[in-house]
Amino acid sequence: MSPDFAIRTEALRKVVPVGFWGKPATILEDVTLDVRRGEVFGFLGPNGAGKTTTIKILLGLIYRTGGRAQVLGYEAGDVRGRRRLGFLPDMPHFPDYLTAEEFLRFYGRLSGLRGPILERQLGQMIEMVGLVDARHHRLHRFSKGMLQRIGIAQALLNDPALVILDEPMSGLDPHGRKEMRDLIVRLKDQNKTVFFSSHQLHEVELVCDRIGILAKGRVIAAGDVPELLGAWCTQHIEMVVERLDGEGMNAARKIAERVTVQGDRVVLIVPTQRDVDALLDLIRSRHASVVALTTHKKSLESLYLEHFAAAADVSLS
Amino acid sequence: MMILVIGANTLREHLRDKILYNLLLFALLLIGSSVLLIRLNHGDSERLIVDLGLSCVNLFGVVIAVFIGIGLVNKEIKSRTIETLVAKPVHRCEFLLGKYLGLVLTLATNTLLMLGGLLGVLMMMGMAIEPMLFKAVLLIFIELMLITAVALLFSTVTTASLSAILTLSMYVIGHLLDDLRTLTLKIEFGLRVLLMGMYYVLPNLESFNLKGRVIHHLEIGQSEFLLTIAYGLVYTMFLLFAAGLIFQRRDFR
């Protein structure tokens, strides 16, 4: 395997027995991914696409039925690969009879840390996630947000080269999401590879270098974010204009898809960047002002429904 | 090393479990109650105290071994803590053996405390403490190690409730194997083969029972004593090996 890749999967396949008679059901059909070292990779897909199953194979929690999977140069599940890996599950479940400090000490020892190095890392992590005051509290007293924080601390305790985050934004409030995004950017700055799954397109777009899109157990698209999402994502652009006179309004109606008058303001909806440029020329010539310019993007779900459902159906048939 | 880390944490988990203290308190009260019971009994007081004491050590030990043993792995899977534990650089066998070690340490603590209670009652009543008593407790402990391994094996393949039923069944059958052998002499060939198969395959738990010998002051030969310990340990290792093989292949979906 090339040392340039933190994760490589090739035609990864997972079939599981379902129901009383163990009828085989295919969870992953063909997952082929390359995640380069040092990049932030977003693993996208609607619920049930197979994101968590892929992550669990990478971690060695479940075994693949077919294909190949390598993590940091080792077969998925190999203990040597897991030495430099940090993982935060989608729902943080940890031994709740332990205090935050005991929990991190226990997980640190499992990661191979000992003595002063463990204690130094433990102190740094507790401080980084802002749980210094709660370090002697048992985890069963922790809120979901605090559990998420201690989960981040355990994932980063061993200074991992690769951090795998399963739906890290789900269930977080806007402040928590912002903190998580900042953390991902910080990890990238430290030259760590971050692989995270999500079904929220806008979160991914903000922090990822590259993405892979999973649908019905298949990777149906992978590549650079602007390349993949730029063309598909913009639904419409909304421009709010002040002091647009009657003549300007008539001209704007010819360019804009929709025009709504709200008091002395006009809201113009246009589909493309070229229309925005044309409107800006018009607004300048009429001595009006642009108050707001907002790009409205499609959700991953609508994108999936429009562009990928058909593709997935074809590829699976 | 990882086995010790997981074992120590498992011991801490159990020591923070209130149910364990309730069981221990109940057992100690029962052992202590023999002081009152001898007032109602006109027979051999020492026999009653030793009999009740050893029975408590055995019974409460089995209850803890079975009901904590079946949850050793299942609880981690059900609560999904296994996901972050197994994602650490730990071999699955190390995890399993660490959990087992933790429960064995819990049982050792518990057994020692109950033995302490029994010795306290015997000393309080001014009765002699024979070395056979310690041998009997050691064999009870070996039996508990074996029962824990049975519970662990079942819990790697089936649900917690079914594991409990199967382990308790194994405990009962294991103490009735000699009767089973007697029964084979009186039944038809097909069933006899099956029962003889069970006799040889299932653990003979009655061999760990020295209560009768302690009560009747009968010594156990050194070789027989060591052989019984070896039998229990080898059987336990075999069960742990089987549990490890199954656990190694399991998917944590």
Image: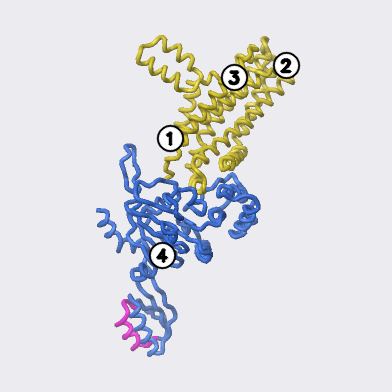
Judge depth for marks 4 and 2 and give the one in front: 4
The residue under label 2 is: B127
The residue under label 4 is: A210
Q: Residues within 10 Å of mark 3 (few under 14, many from 20)?
A: some
Instruction: Estimate the spatial distance between the alpha carbons at disc 4 and disc 2, rounded to whole Å.
Output: 79 Å
Q: Residues within 10 Å of mark 1 (few under 14, many from 20)?
A: some
Instruction: Estimate the spatial distance between the alpha carbons at disc 1 and disc 3, rounded to whole Å.
Output: 33 Å
Residue type marked 1: Val
The x, y position of residue A316, in whole percent, is 27, 54
N-terminal of the two: label 2 or label 3? Answer: 2
Instruction: Estimate the spatial distance between the alpha carbons at disc 1 and disc 2, rounded to whole Å.
Output: 47 Å
* The magenta segment: A244-259
Tell me if I can see residue B13 in this picture. no
Residue type marked 2: Met
The residue under label 3 is: B225
Residue type marked 4: Arg
Screen quadrant of the N terminus of chain A: bottom left
Label 4 SS: strand
Say which chain tag 4 marks: A
Task: Name the residue nearer the viewer: B189 or A113.
Answer: A113
**Residue B126 placement: quadrant:** top right
Say which chain tag 2 marks: B
N-terminal of the two: label 1 or label 2? Answer: 2
Q: Judging from the image, what is the letter of the chain drawn in yellow?
A: B
Residue type marked 3: Phe
